[in-house]
Amino acid sequence: MSKSSVPDTKQIQYDRQLRLWGDHGQKALESGRVCLIGANALGTEILKALVLPGLGSFTIIDHQSVTLADCGSNFFVHPSMVDQPRARITCEFLSQLNPDVRGTYIDKPSIDELLKQNTFDFSQFSAVITANLPYKTLSILASHLWTIKVPLLIARNYGLIGMIRLQVVEHYVIEAHPDDTIPDLRLDRPLRRFVEHCNSIDFDSLTREEHLHLPSLIILYKTLQLWQKQTHRSDLPRTRSEKDEFKQILEKLSHHSAYETQDQHKSLENFEEAKRTIPSRLVTANLPVTIKDLFQDHACLELTSQSNIFWFIVHALKQFTENEGQGLLPVRGEVPDMITSTNSYVKLLEIFQEQAQTDREIVHNYLLDLLEKHKRMSNDCINLYPLVEIYCKNAAFLKVLRTSALRQIDEFKEETSSDLAWYIGLHFCDLFYEKYDRYPGEYLSDSEQFYVDLDDLKELHKQRSNKSLTSGNIQSILEELCRYGASEIHSVAAFVGGCCAQEAIKLITHQYVPIDNTMVYNGIEQSISVFKL
């Protein structure tokens, strides 16, 4: 075995995640910088799920000391550490999980003081994450981050309820990794070399072995040629009767003179595969609606020297589509696995990959011209070809996510029938905190205090909502939230923390599609709901 083929330590350590987001995704993650505000159970679970896969660095902001309550839910503190700075203790233990990750902390001043001083540079971070941050502080932070265009992930664990909210001005999804994709084969507008290759194959002169291993893609195209000739058409079969005619021609092609008599009615796997894949192969090649919208986005049409490289590449793709692509995006260069010989498959793959490379080079040249035109050429732009390759391969799935800014939720206060009611209930708990400097049910002096807090919480709801508390759902939600007393349950914190870490990785790597924009976890019913607020 050659030395270059032996996996290094990092490949072994991160093997499973490299299969998800690749070497370039891992490199992006290792360059990521995250700021966590709140080193409670939820916050440490979030960072744990970021440190283990190899986040570049993190900074913890937390002015509080370790309490006995922390020891009941946070695995990164111990009763012997009570009254010690929580930021320092958790930072030290989290850093031990992965020596490659750099961890720092700020335990003085508090986040409120930092925001008041307005001297701390939040723009250095790939994302800022808050864990159970009081709403008043959160709203100030959210407004500041919105202004400087830094993504904000708001995480919360309140008893059996969890919540994640994403605020981002503009986020670019380069590799969406959709679950089901139709292969980019373009049988209705075939590649020139593919047509030449198919025309070089004469069915009548094939040997039995060649016929048995003929790729289903070629079988479908040869069938399409015969169907178009028979019907004097140039498009694809669309109606049921047309598809039945197509299948009849396909059936005739499956017979071969070289077969023995006993083989005549034997099913051929490659022809069965061709018949089975008709719905995903005989599709009209076109420009996805989402990409049309992207091409018409003002950020694409009005490039400036300050535009993100994303928009320069999207504009280059637009130019290709309008010219060489003749209305289509660059060829992806992928061929799905099929029943055939290795040589036949490799030949097909080479045809599509060669065209993909040609298309990429054209897009790359368009990009360089655009960068030169807008005076964006620099040393960082010298080797953009690998990035162009990623964009071209994923061109059909590019996406821009623009969420709303965090704001008051008056327009949602009448919702009582879904998990959104829990989100609204948490908002009333925040209003309670602003009024009493603690959450309902928290720090109870006696059993009577619970009912006093519950009545106060109901009164806040009555003042701010048109709905009466005759609704059983609202009544039970407020009672349950008051009973939780803002407690953190580790199992819920671990689950919500893991979900939040995944969203952070999506933001850092620009892979997979983040939530848009609020996720509510209901631990009572074990359900997750996503709402766009």
Image (spheres, helix red, strand yellow):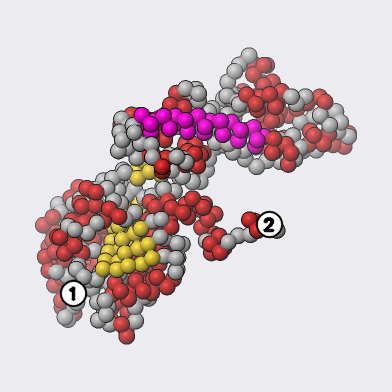
Residue 450, which numbered label?
Answer: 1
Which residue is drawn at the image coordinates 64% and 16% (left, top)? 231
> How many neighbours does mark 2 have within 10 angstroms: few (below 14), some (14-19), or many (20 or more)?
few
The image quadrant that residue 307 belongs to is top left
Instruction: Provide the residue span drawn in magenta.
Output: 348-373
**Residue at the spot x=49%, y=46% of the render?**
177
**Where in the figure is residue 53, as x and y percent of width and height?**
46, 62
Q: Nearer the viewer, residue 260 or 297?
A: 297
Q: Residue at x 16, y 80 (%)?
A: 445
Residue 140 painted magenta: no
In the picture of the structure, the residue carrying the numbered disc 2 is 2
Q: How many marks?
A: 2
418 versus 204 height, above or below: below
- Look at label 1 and name its amino acid: Phe
Q: Is residue 160 visible?
A: no
Measured as percent of width and height from the top left, residue 252 is found at 75, 26
Residue 56 at x, y = what percent?
Answer: 40, 60
